[in-house]
Image: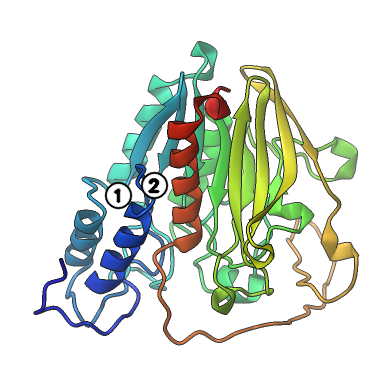
Amino acid sequence: DHNENIPTELFAGTTLCHEMAAEYLGSFGVPYEVIGGNHDLEGIDEFDTDEENLQVFLEKHHKETPHFAREISEKTFIVGLGSTVFRDATFTSHEVIVDDQQLAWFEKFLIDHPADDGWKVFVFTHAPPNGSGLRVLQENHVVNGCCWLNHSDDKKCRKYIELVRQHRSIKAWFSGHFHLGQDYQDSITFPTIPREEGPYPNRGSCVFAQTSVMRGGTSRDGRQQSRLLRGNKDGFEICTVDHQKQGEVRLDATIVYKDTGHEVGIFAHDDVAYEHDKYFKVYQPQTGGKYKQTYIYIHVIVIITYIYVNTFMLFQITTLSHLAKSTQTCFYF
């Protein structure tokens, strides 16, 4: 029950915001997991410190730590890492910062669950790690130092992709943060690409997937989408749930395991950005590159305040929990 002494005006990161999110997610009647993003500690008028704000976030969702690990099938885990800093950020409050304790826990978890023993790990964070190759917004997140996990700390920023390269048990990594749709070819990146197509990226055995938003008012390109992860005996499928089409599900990519350390990924549809010129065009710089790209902006909405507790990732995890409980075969990897 809501404490009557706590303000009832709703802003991101407040007690009321987290209570509403917990009530909504709990209404499905199945276990769920949450991870904190760059807005979830934004209750600056209610809390003096990040620690106080984080404690309420954890309490309302019945969590002991900002991170989680849940085994959803035999030797298959979903793992989440949450942001713990807002007021105390070095440069911008909207940098997604995973603290040292979580990072140490994550590295030990990967060491204890090696690919050679058959373990498979699916990771969820609000922002993606640097090196993922996912589409980014240069003029918004990159220049402000809040694009990738622990963006402002060079060593920690590189740590995530280093762990991906070292631990081939990481099979997929889902993130959001950019409020971009899932219709672009670089909304999903695979472990490797043919050398003749460009610089050879070492992404271990991990498929990276960008996740959009559910509510139209927070979308940067008009898309309202979530991710659905479906497992099978040969690998897994990454799908889009389209909230503008009453939850229509579209297959985006199929990933097949060749062995414990190698996968083959196939796109299920073309890059819709090529269909016309009304989508974002975002250049990802390469070493020695001289390409210049003109940016195209549409449907850009300035958001003053909105209800936001990492909605798209919450939906995503809830979907996974629901499937794991009701249809166990969906998570037999």
Residue 217, position as x, y percentages in the image: 56, 79
Q: Quadrant of residue 94?
A: bottom left
Secondary-structure class at tag 1: loop
Viewer-nearest residue: 252 or 83: 252
Q: Is residue 329 above or below residue 19?
A: above
Mark 2 vs mark 1: which is more N-terminal? 1
Q: Residue at x 78, y 79 (%)?
A: 296
Residue 35, position as x, y percentages in the image: 38, 53
Q: Is residue 85 above or below residue 166?
A: below
Viewer-nearest residue: 88 or 209: 209
Q: Residue at x 65, y 31 (%)?
A: 236
Q: Quadrant of the N terminus?
A: bottom left
Residue 10, position as x, y percentages in the image: 31, 81
Residue 210 can be seen in this image: yes
Residue 154 can be seen in this image: no
Kind of residue at badge 1: Pro
Kind of residue at badge 2: Leu
Viewer-nearest residue: 14 or 281: 14
Q: Which mark is residue 66?
A: 1
Residue 136, position as x, y percentages in the image: 65, 63
Question: Going by the picture, which residue comes out furthest to the top?
Answer: 117
Query: Do tag 2 and tag 1 residues touch (Cβ < 8 Å)?
Result: yes
Q: Quick check: 249 left or right of 45?
A: right
Secondary-structure class at tag 2: loop
